[in-house]
Image (cartoon, grey):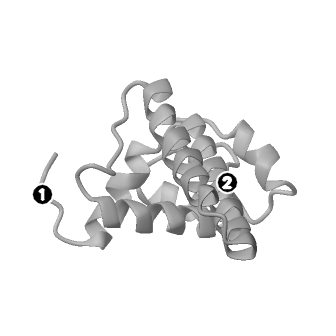
């Protein structure tokens, strides 16, 4: 992997490493679990929710890279950029703008996360890879 000097250079690389829809689906699910567990911790003060947030997010994310087979988690090489990219991917998925970035990164999709989609989860599941 070439040396990446900025997050702007890292983002297309991150998308390429997450080009398989299964990887993105598991990342988005893990980020949702993490958010819910952090919310539960804030409401209850029970620190076990923080452990569940880490296990839910990182566990699913790392497993997704094993399932995809060809993809490596960027967490070890760029942990803060990886976290930022994970959250950015989540926000762009919620806003239905992730398709645009995937196309700019050269990743072909079939109605993955477009504004025209009626259901983000349904279209996420249909999304094709390369």
Q: CA distance from mark 1 to mark 2?
A: 32 Å
Does residue 130 appear anywhere in the picture? no
- Residue 4 placement, left or right of 117: left
Q: Quadrant of the N terminus?
A: top left
The quadrant in which residue 91 appears is bottom right
Residue 33: mark: 2
Q: Could you tell me if the residues under marks 1 and 2 are in contact, i.e. CB atoms within 8 Å? A: no
Label 1: how many Cα within 10 Å (few below 14, some 14–19, many 20+): few
Image height of 76 relative to 86, above or below:
above
Single out the residue that lies furthest toward the left.
Answer: 3
Q: Where is mark 1, residue-wise?
A: 3
Q: Nearer the viewer, mark 1 or mark 2?
A: 2
**How many other residues sit within 10 Å of disc 2, few (<14), some (14-19) or many (≥20)?**
some
Relative to the observer, which residue lies in front, 77 or 57?
57
**Image-quadrant location for residue 110:** top right
Q: Secondary structure at mark 2?
A: helix
């Amino acid at each position: 992997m070439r040396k990446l000097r900025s997050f702007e250079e890292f983002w297309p690389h991150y998308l390429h490493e997450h080009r398989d829809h299964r990887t993105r689906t598991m990342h988005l699910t893990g980020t949702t679990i993490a958010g819910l567990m952090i919310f539960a911790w804030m409401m209850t003060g029970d620190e076990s929710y923080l452990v569940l947030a880490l296990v839910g997010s990182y566990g699913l994310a790392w497993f997704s890279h094993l399932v995809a087979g060809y993809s490596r988690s960027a967490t070890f090489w760029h942990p803060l950029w990886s976290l930022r990219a994970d959250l950015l991917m989540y926000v762009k998925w919620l806003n239905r703008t992730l398709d645009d970035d995937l196309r700019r990164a050269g990743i072909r999709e079939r109605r993955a996360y477009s504004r025209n989609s009626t259901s983000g989860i349904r279209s996420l599941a249909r999304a094709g890879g390369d």
